[in-house]
Amino acid sequence: MTRRALLQACLGGAGLMALSPLAVAAESPAASAPIVWRMPTEYPASTMPGEGLATFARRVAERSGGALAVRPSFDAAAGLRSGAMIGAVEAGTVEAADAFTGPLAAVDPLFGLSSLPFLATSIEEARALAGIARPAYARALARHGQRLLYVTPWAPSGIWSRHALAGAADLQGLRIRTYDATSAAVLAAAGARSVNLSQADAIPQVKAGAVDAMLSSGDGGVGRRLWEQLPHFLAVQYAMPISIALVSGAAYDALPDTLRHAVDEAAAETEARQWAAIRTRLDENFSRMRQNGVVIADPPPPEITGALARAGEAAVAAWVKDTGAEGERILAAYRGR
C-alpha cells in the first residue's frame, strides 16, 4: 500500500481533504530532493572561473526552480586540477567541472589553442578565437561523452617575479612556473628553467623559494595574493587563454526537457556575463595589485617580449602539426576573419 493510500484508509472517506499541505507536498514530485551536479574548479572563488561557476550555479537554481542544484567547489578543494577534469567527469567522480584549457591539451591538443603565445592578446581577439574553435572543442568533449557548457576568458598572461625583469638576460635560468606544456617549452626556449605546474601546486613551490616567477594572469595572481611572494608583474600579454565548463553528457541527457533548457539558458547567460566582466577586470586587477605594492611593468621591455615571441614561433608550428587539418582550418579562419 502506498503512503497516500495508507493515509486515506486511516482518515476515511474525507482522507484526501484532510491531508495537510505538508503531506500533499511530500507526495509531489516538486518536493523531492533536487538533482545535484558536483562541479569543481582549481581556482579561488574570486577569480574569473570562480565567479563564473558561482553565477552558473545561481542561474541554474533560478531557471530550474530548485529542481537542479549545481554544487561548486573552489581552490582545488575537490582534489582535482584542470588537467584531470575531463577524466574525473568521464569516470563519474563529478558530474561537471570548470577547467583551464592549457593542461587539457594532454587529452586533446586542440585545447592548447587559446594559450598559444601572442596569438590572441585582446578581448576581441580572444572572443573571436573562442567562437571559431567552439565546434572543435565541443567535438573533442563529445569524444569523452561530455558537453561544453560555457567559456570563461582569462585576463592576459604576464610574469609575476620575485625581482624585476629588465631584459632578455634576466630570463636566463629564471625558475618559473608555467601553466601548460606549450608555455613550458616557450620559456625554456627563451632560456628560463621552466616547470609546468597547476596554480594550486605552484603556490607552495613559490613560498618555499623553489620557484622565483610565475606565468599567470593578473586575475590569477590577485586571487592567490601572489604579491606576498612575487611583487613584480611584467605585462607581456603572452596570451589571453580560456577556461571551459563541461558536463557529463549522460547527466545532461538524463534531465527532462525543461531542465535541459534551464541548463542551456543558464550557461548562455553565464558566458555572456564572463565576457562582459573581463572588460573591466584588467584595470580592477592592476588597481588592487598596486594597492598591495606590486610594481607593474606595462609596457614591458621590448627585448623580453621579442625574445618570447621568437621562442613562441616553434610552439605554434608544433600545435598545427599535432592538430593537423582541423588546427590549420581554425588558424586560417581566425587569421582571415
Image (cartoon, grey):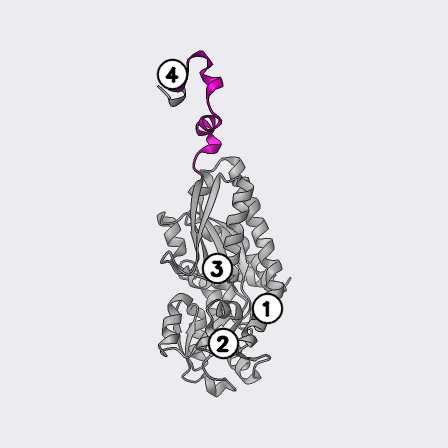
| Nearer to us in this view, 23 or 230 | 23
Instruction: Please report whichever mark, 1 or 4, sits nearer to the chain's N-terminal start.
Output: 4
The percent position of residue 255, horizontal first and vertical second, equals 47, 38
- Image quarter where the N terminus lies is top left
The percent position of residue 241, horizontal first and vertical second, equals 52, 65
Residue 326 appears in view: no
Q: Is residue 15 magenta?
A: yes
Residue 114 appears in view: yes
Instruction: Please report whichever mark, 1 or 3, sits nearer to the chain's N-terminal start.
Output: 3
- The amino acid beneath tag 4 is Cys
What's the residue at 35%, 49% (across, down)? 91
Which quadrant of the structure image shows residue 131? bottom right
Does the magenta stretch mainly form a helix, a strand or a loop? helix
Instruction: Please report whichever mark, 1 or 2, sits nearer to the chain's N-terminal start.
Output: 2
Q: Are marks 3 and 2 in contact (CB under 8 Å)?
A: no
Q: Which residues are magenta?
A: 5-33
Viewer-nearest of labels 1 and 2?
Answer: 1
- The amino acid beneath tag 1 is Glu
As helix, strand or loop, the secondary structure at mark 1 comes to helix
The percent position of residue 337, horizontal first and vertical second, equals 64, 62
Residue 100 vs 238, above or below: the answer is: above
Which residue matches tag 2?
159
Which quadrant of the structure image shows residue 23? top left
What's the residue at 37%, 19% (across, down)? 6
Mark 4–mark 2 distance (CA, rounded to whole Å): 73 Å
- The amino acid beneath tag 3 is Ala
